[in-house]
Image (cartoon, helix red, strand yellow):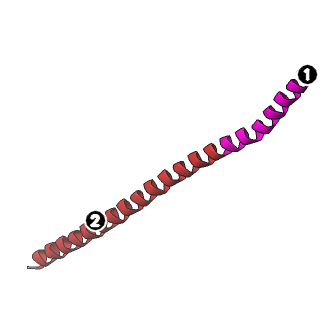
Amino acid sequence: KNLRKECDELKRQIAQKKSEITDQNLLLGDKRKKYTTTTKQFDELTHSIENLEAEYLQSKLKPAELLKQTDSLSLQR
């Protein structure tokens, strides 16, 4: 009878550990989803920033190009 009690207790402990591991796996899954979402958002923001920087550089170059064109037109006259 004593062995049976010990065996039942061990089975109970194993079931409890399995339950804890399942809960931890669910939490890890949630964290992985959040990480993936955050990483995706970060990549999208980085891409947006790169596009905005490129547009900004283009807008800074345009006045300089226009001045060059104006200067060359003035010289041609």
- Residue pointed to by mark 1: 77
Above or below for 25 versus 36 = below
| Magenta residue check for 36 | no
| Residue at image location 52% in from the left, 49% down from the top | 44
The kind of residue tagged 2 is Thr
Residue 22's tag is 2
Above or below for 31 versus 67 = below
| Quarter of the view holding residue 8 | bottom left
Give the structural element (helix, strand or loop) at label 2: helix
Q: Is residue 16 left or right of residue 67?
A: left
Q: Residues within 10 Å of mark 1 (few under 14, many from 20)?
A: few
| Residue at image location 39% in from the left, 58% down from the top | 33
Q: How many marks?
A: 2
Q: Residue furthest top?
A: 76
Give the structural element (helix, strand or loop) at label 1: loop
State whether the magenta stretch is mostly helix, strand or loop: helix
> Which residues, given as a range, are shown in magenta?
53-77
Above or below for 65 versus 9 = above
| Magenta residue check for 63 | yes
Q: Residue furthest left?
A: 1
Residue 48 image point, x, y percent? 58, 48
Residue 18 image point, x, y percent? 25, 66
Q: Is residue 29 left or right of residue 63?
A: left
